Amino acid sequence: MKFTSRKILITCLSLMLLLLAACSNATSSNTEQTTTSGENTTNTSESTTTAGDTNKTTYPLTIENFSISGEGGEWKPKSQTFEKAPERVVANTQSVAEMLIKLGLTDKMVGVAALYGSVTPDVADDFAKIPVLSENYVGKELVVGASPDIVLGRGDLFADADWGVGTVDGLNDMNIHTFLQTTNHKGTLDSLYNDIAQLGQIFDVQENATSFTESLKARAEAIKASVADQPEHTFAYIVPASEDSITVSSMQNDTYQLDALSLLKLKNTFDGVQGEVSVEQLITANPDYLLLSAYTGSPDIDKLIQNLYANPALQSMNAIKNKQIYVTDFGQFWGYGHQILDGIENMQKQMNENPIQ
């Protein structure tokens, strides 16, 4: 995950075992399948997912994806050509492993890492079958040791670092395919749908992918409909750096999370703000809601909330006066997967139970 203020995030990461490694969001794109010289090629910039995209995959299949030049590096287009459906899969985060389970690919999973959130109950039994390479971010040695033919997941974790699975180019040179989720590179919910469509083609499970995507779209529309008659509200995101400090993220580059929050008609208070956000700016902006995330190993969230409500400097803020602080699960909010809809639905329920007066 990447908060807008990179310096704030890196500081938090060093205190929390690099839990919040920097990441971007994924480019919103549509996908269109074309056939060239006998090769089935999917271009992420031109195609869409429809109910008719249920044909069997014709291999070799070329997927347009990306490489990234290390932590915080530039994303560059790079295609991956598959001669057949991958048989041994490593997911670099829990959230993407859950998404593969939803696509019916549990038996292909040979490794998962970064177990920082709650496992969705409906996939818990299948998730327990997947070998855990590391409960934290996993390094290249353990990933390669699992003998995968594809490594996929969050793009910022494709780096030659102790928390990285290795670079795209390095893994490709070892004949290991890669797939970077586009949700964490200037992404939106459409990026999620397109990622699912491409995974459906790679693994030849298009029908599962289409069904899954349509169910997610229906949930997103239901959330929008539920607040159609309500006014727009503002929010600010508090980074849970410690129980006794206030660290604010402008979320300037977190387009995936912002797109999901817009389903609830929530607008980022610091839209357009670059760099660090001070407590004074937070007080002046006076958001309606404060949001934060809880993760395995995070500071005591209940104590942090108590301190926020009790802080004398914050008493003029609407979010404090109206008791409007909400917590999301880290995996749901920062996993860059479909679980973000779970988080938004849970937030919607909590807000309905405690409406702004």
Image (cartoon, rainbow, N blue to C red):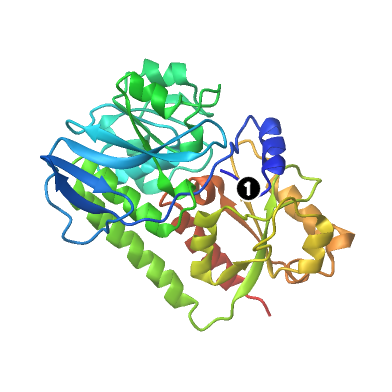
Q: Residue at x 63, y 35 (%)?
A: 297
Q: Is residue 307 left or right of residue 123?
A: right
Label 1 packing within 10 angstroms: few (<14), some (14-19), many (20+): many
Under circle 1, the secondary element is loop
Residue 114 seen in this snapshot: no
Q: Position of residue 276 (x, y in %)?
A: 75, 50
**Figure check: 175 above or below 302:** above
Reading the image, the residue beneath label 1 is 3
* Residue 100, image quadrant: top left
Location of the N terminus by quadrant is: top right
Which residue, as the protein is rendered here, is positioned at the far right? Answer: 312
* Residue 13, image quadrant: top right
Q: Position of residue 164 (x, y in %)?
A: 51, 27
Q: Residue at x 43, y 39 (%)?
A: 76
Q: Is residue 33 left or right of residue 46?
A: left
Q: Residue at x 12, y 51 (%)?
A: 55
Looking at the rendered structure, the number of numbered marks drawn on it comes to 1
Q: Position of residue 5 (x, y in %)?
A: 68, 47
**Figure check: 35 above or below 325:** above
Q: Residue at x 35, y 19 (%)?
A: 146
The type of residue carrying mark 1 is Phe
Residue 279 seen in this snapshot: yes
Location of the C terminus by quadrant is: bottom right
